[in-house]
Image (cartoon, rainbow, N blue to C red):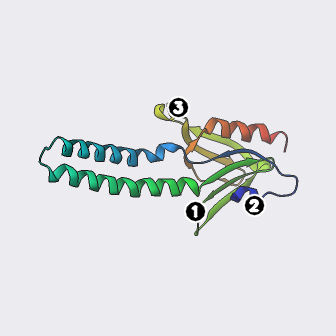
Amino acid sequence: MRYVEGVLQPGEEVRHVSTIHWGIYWPAILLFLLALAGVAGFAEQIAPPLPLLVAAGAFAIGLLFFLGAWFRRWTTELAVTSRRIVFKRGFIRRHSIEMNMDKVESVDVDQSVLGRILGYGDIVVHGTGGGLEPLRRIDSPIAFRNAVTAGQGSA
């Protein structure tokens, strides 16, 4: 069961769910490509031991990066319900933040050019008396903002 489903109150419904964008896998992908280039260099017999060592090292480090990114993405949830915004990250050491919809003043979305092309961005939710910490590299930030602003009038 997802965290958000476990903290729903009676009569509360989930309107939008998001997580970290898949772009956090890029470092691992680049290392896997470096490993592939090392294997190709080994196949061409260019100084045989060096390309194979580069390939093995790049693959091992890439695998660690991939598993770290997967775990971070898997343990991060961001949801808009009919009554609040819920953000959770972590597995054993959990960090969660919730804000009631009637306390939301504004939602800021920051997207770079690449973020607009690939569909990710940073979100900051401002509320009365404080706000959520910046949520970085969130998938579909405009859909998230729209779910918050559409939910404010009907909460």
Type of amino acid at the residue the image marks with label 2: Gly
The crowding category of the residue bearing disc 1, from other C-alpha atoms within 10 Å (few below 14, some 14 to 19, many at least 20), is some
Q: Using the numbered discs, state the Cα–Cα distance from disc 3 to disc 2 in whole angstroms.
A: 32 Å
Amino acid type, mark 3: Arg
Q: Tell me the residue that label 1 is attached to.
A: 90
Query: Which residue corresponds to mark 2?
Result: 6
Q: Note whether 10 is above or below 104 in the view shown.
A: below
- Depth check, mark 3 against mark 2: the one in front is 2
Give residue 89's quadrant in the image. bottom right
Q: Nearer the viewer, residue 98 or 128?
A: 98
Where residue 57 appears, x then y in whole percent? 28, 56
The quadrant of the picture occupied by the N terminus is: bottom right
- Classify residue 19 as left or right of residue 50: right
Residue at 58%, 69% (x, y): give it. Answer: 92
**Which of the labelled discs sits on residue 116, or is there none?**
3
Mark nearest the camera among 3 and 1 is: 1
Q: Residues within 10 Å of mark 2 (few under 14, many from 20)?
A: few
Dot 1 amino acid type: Gly
Residue 97, position as x, y percentages in the image = 67, 58
Depth order, front residue of 131/147? 147
- Residue at x 62% of width, y 40% of height: 108
Measuring from the top left, give residue 136's x and y in whole percent.
54, 47
Instruction: Look at the image and tell me in which quarter the C terminus lies.
Output: top right
Kindly identify the residue that appears in the image at 48 percent across and 53 percent down: 69
**Secondary structure category for the residue under label 3:** helix
